[in-house]
Amino acid sequence: MTILVTGGAGFIGSHTVVQLVKAGHAVVVFDNLCNGTAEALRRIERLTGKSVPLVEGDVRDRTALDALFRSYQVTAVIHFAGLKAVGESVRQPLAYYDNNVNGTLVLCQAMQAAGVRKLVFSSSATVYGSDAPVPYVETLPRGRTSNPYGTSKAMVEQLLTDLQVAEPGWSVVLLRYFNPIGAHPSGVIGEDPRGLPNNLMPFISQVAVGRLPELAIFGDDYPTDDGTCVRDYLHVLDLADGHVQALGQLVAPGLHIYNLGTGLGVSVLDMVRSFERVTGRSIPYRVAPRRDGDLAAFWADATKAQRELGWQASRGLDEMIADTWRWQSQNPQGYQD
Ligand code: NAD
Ligand code: WQD
């Protein structure tokens, strides 16, 4: 009775592994380490007292997956493995469709051959597209995506939907994440982007720790209260708990879709000011032009997850910031420290 976590050496995967182990699950991680690190798994052992096996491999490698399914009695798969940088996806669409779409296809073929038909997939609020009304609710159709990353998530949602219709014995949960931030409260694991961070929170925390000189705020002329973009930030441990709770939905066949967010909108300036207040650090910033493809404001309607999974984000913004800062200040260079 083992949960296979693909991409378990990455940011969200590593936090989910901790919560799975805490909930009593046996876990095996499968990751090619292109954006994750074995050090995260060593630190998880320190945190949980349990050693979690890491099988190094690529989800596009059918032979490696077949060998894994022969070695472990896998009951369900949580599939995080994939590429996630929006700008890079515009420059390298083939890499994104290959990793994210083909990777999921090969994984599903290997699962089918092994008789494992329970899957939780990392989707994204981005599948609602650019014209959806806020808050986003699961009954909305998928919208027009504006970059290959978002399109790859929408394509995988469709692939899994078609599979579940054709083979009704499958149990599939599509989790649409909003903006995960934060870190484990121990400060032992956290987000460790390679190169210049694309996302707001790691950028701010690297400015705070002195790795970067200042934050560029992408636009202050949006139609929001303070002119900066509004997002629904949620604590990565709440997101991890959402996966543990989603496993309960895999008991019966079917396909379920859930938003995982707080339902609260926070602007970029709110985030900078809250970070300064919580950490006592100043965050120098300048206002820069808008970033291509950014939407002014969106947040989740997360009532379905509450109703059906009993899941609700419980950690507030100050806790997300304090935990991010504990991780970043204790590990200024991330896992290299
Ligand atoms: P991450 O890059 O930290 O983790 C992804 C992990 O997958 C990494 O450890 C990487 O080495 C591994 N990986 C990538 N391609 C692989 C492949 N072909 N075979 C095996 N392993 C591979 O990213 P994350 O933030 O933890 O995101 C996890 C998942 O959640 C991704 O699918 C991402 O698209 C999705 N998601 C993330 C966010 C976010 O804001 N972080 C939001 C919505 C959805
Ligand atoms: C948040 C806000 C920026 C950096 C992206 C993906 C989405 C999902 C999560 C995952 C925006 C502003 C940012 C900076 C800034 N992906 N910002 N200066 O764009 O909501 O979502 O990550 O896998 O699919 O699109 O998150 O953290 O990049 O940006 O002003 O240096 O912060 O303009 O308004 P986003 P983000």
Image: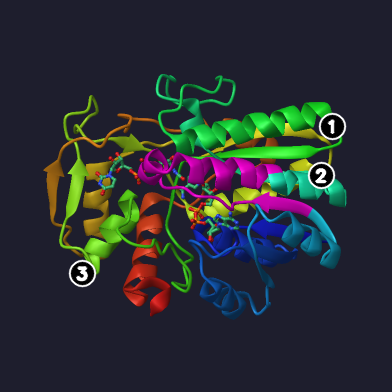
Left or right, residue 80 beside residue 210 = right
**So how many labels did they put on this image?**
3
What residue sits 33% from the left and 61% below the top?
195
What residue sits 38% from the left and 80% below the top?
337
Cα gap from disc 3 to disc 1, whole angstroms: 53 Å
Q: Split into 4 quadrants, where in the image is the N terminus?
A: bottom right
Provide the residue designation for mark 1.
167
Task: Name the mark nearer the viewer: 3 or 1.
Answer: 1
Mark 3 crowd level (few <14, some 14–19, many ≥20, 10 Å Cα): few
Disc 2 is placed on an element classified as loop
Q: Is residue 121 visible?
A: no
Residue 133 part of the magenta-drawn span:
no
Q: Return the x and y of residue 5 as percentages of the image width and height.
A: 67, 58
The tag on residue 210 is: 3
Question: Who comes first in sequence, dot 3 or dot 1?
Answer: 1
Residues tagged 2 and 1 counted as in contact (Cβ below 8 A): yes
Mark 2 crowd level (few <14, some 14–19, many ≥20, 10 Å Cα): many
Question: Who comes first in sequence, dot 3 or dot 2?
Answer: 2
Provide the residue designation for mark 2.
117
Q: Return the x and y of residue 39 as percentages of the image width and height.
A: 52, 76
Q: Amino acid at mark 1?
A: Glu
What residue sits 61% from the left and 53% below the top?
241
Q: Quadrant of residue 46?
A: bottom right
Q: Amino acid at mark 3?
A: Gly
Cα gap from disc 2 to disc 1, whole angstroms: 9 Å
Q: Return the x and y of residue 89 as percentages of the image width and height.
A: 42, 42
Task: Name the mark nearer the viewer: 3 or 2.
Answer: 2
Q: Return the x and y of residue 182 as percentages of the image width and height.
A: 42, 58
